[in-house]
Image: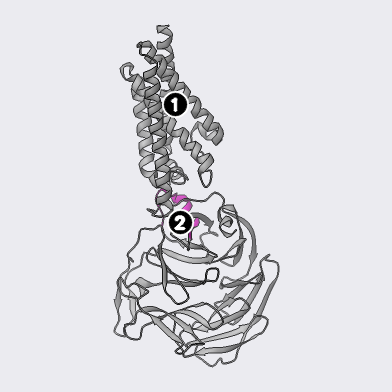
Amino acid sequence: MKKIALHVSYIVSCFFILLFIYAALSKLLDFENFQVQLSQSPLLSAYAGFISYAVIAIEIIIALLLSFRQERLLGLYASLGLMAGFTIYIYLILFYSDFIPCSCGGILEKLGWTEHLIFNIACIALALVGIFFHEDNRHIRLLRPILYSGVLILISTTSVIILFITSEYIIKKDNNFTRRFLLHPILDDKSLDLTINSYYFAGISNGKIFLGNITAPLLLTAIDTSLNETKTVKIELDASDYHYRNIQLQVKDSNYYFYDGSVPIIYRGTLGDTVAHTISHQDAFFTQLAIVDSVHFMIRTQSSKTREYVLASLNLDKTPKLQLYPSLLEKQIDGVFDVDGKLLFQPYNTEVLYTYTYRNQILAMDRQLNILRKLHTIDTSTIAKIQTHRLSDGTHKMSSPPLKVNGEIASHRNLLFIHSNLKGRHESSKMWNKAAVVDIYRTDRQEYIGSFYIEHKGETVFSHMALDDQYLYVLIQNELKRYRLREPISKYFN
């Protein structure tokens, strides 16, 4: 019996030596991919850097312990603890995670997650057999290995559960720039050739996508959301003798608006009518405009005293029409480029959003421009990394290329989509060369939802994006592409 116990313990040890050496080598040989996969784990994303090294080191150490007879018992207990941790990890993946990721490489990549769970449970049973036979060979009563094994399994599983809970909090609330790519969140659905590349999104209303045109600014193009019918009309302005620099178009509800903040002027027309009428002239100069309703606008303008950007409310039904809010945009360097960003209005919750371009901050405000929440993106750039100098006329100019954090944005209901310009931790360089990253955030609270890729067309990145309940629309070169939103995103709209 003693010889049988010795042989069983030895065979079990050999199995785990082969298993752990193979697992460690397969991870080392494709270490970058292993880190990327860990960073996409719905349980351990926040600790991908530490865990990627720790797991390999532990597997090698356990294999060494099992190789020496005097340390074999310790190696068997360590094998039990590690396999218990792996098992609870897979259990949490299957029953408690937001999504089920791809497998982790090696020979086990061929197994599904359920089969992987069964394999790990079998390994736990095998480790227990090895421990019991090893202790039996030493004439140790069975109670001690049972107690030790139970405590070890409890410690190991509890540790993984704690890592899971804290990792989820870090990823969603206090992210350290680790992206989690959602599992097939969009599906390439349909495209339309626009023949030219000068279009931009003006809005989505009544089942139609409206486009403005940089090179032909008075054209209003309407495309049904099925991308089957296109209609373009030329709009006439009731007063057009101004020296326009950059006339732009927005569509909201049943109205369209042409405006140029350098004149400054705002026109409003009704969809179906080709004449736009002046509703505001010389009320306020502005660099950006967001439409709240037919007479109420949020604008970004420049202070006549400091030449710095400020947010303001322009309400044509009030006296005075213009109300400045100079304390909203927080100056860090020059009050111009360092507070640069994009302004939009969310009809769903009647909130105003301002997303900074050169830092990881988002302002959520009500219709009176009271700050409701200060949110942040997962990038760690809290201070704008720019260099500027002020010219003699009081204007500012960039003196070196800036570090741009946030690019194009789009919002629908309580989600904000941001085209990010910075690569996160443990991300594939190969993917960054052929696709753009879009990060998704909730705007009703601080929460990062996840990310996805939009592939380039050749070497060209998409230029604009827009959303509705079912689709993401992007403009890339001369093409309008439609992506169907799948459950990882659409569930937030239900």
Q: Residues within 10 Å of mark 1 (few under 14, many from 20)?
A: few
Residue 360 pos. (x, y %): 38, 63
Q: Residue furthest right?
A: 229
What secondary structure is marked by label 1? Answer: helix
The residue shown at (34%, 79%) is 308
Q: Is residue 325 above or below residue 384?
A: below
- Tag shown at residue 19: 1
Magenta-drawn stretch contains 439: yes
60 or 277: nearer the eye?
277
Q: Residues within 10 Å of mark 2 (few under 14, many from 20)?
A: many
Q: Is residue 271 above or below residue 347?
A: below
Residue 321 pos. (x, y %): 46, 87
15 or 216: nearer the eye?
15
Q: CA distance from mark 1 to mark 2?
A: 37 Å
> In the rendered structure, which amino acid carries the disc numbered 1?
Leu
Badges 1 and 2: C-beta atoms under 8 Å apart?
Answer: no
Q: Is residue 242 left or right of residue 150?
A: right
**Residue on which the image places disc 2:** 448
Which range is magenta?
422-441
- The quadrant the N terminus occupies is top left
What secondary structure is marked by label 2? Answer: strand
Q: Is residue 263 above or below residue 414?
A: below
374 or 308: nearer the eye?
374
70 or 425: nearer the eye?
70
> In the rendered structure, which amino acid carries the disc numbered 2?
Tyr
Quarter occupied by residue 200: bottom right
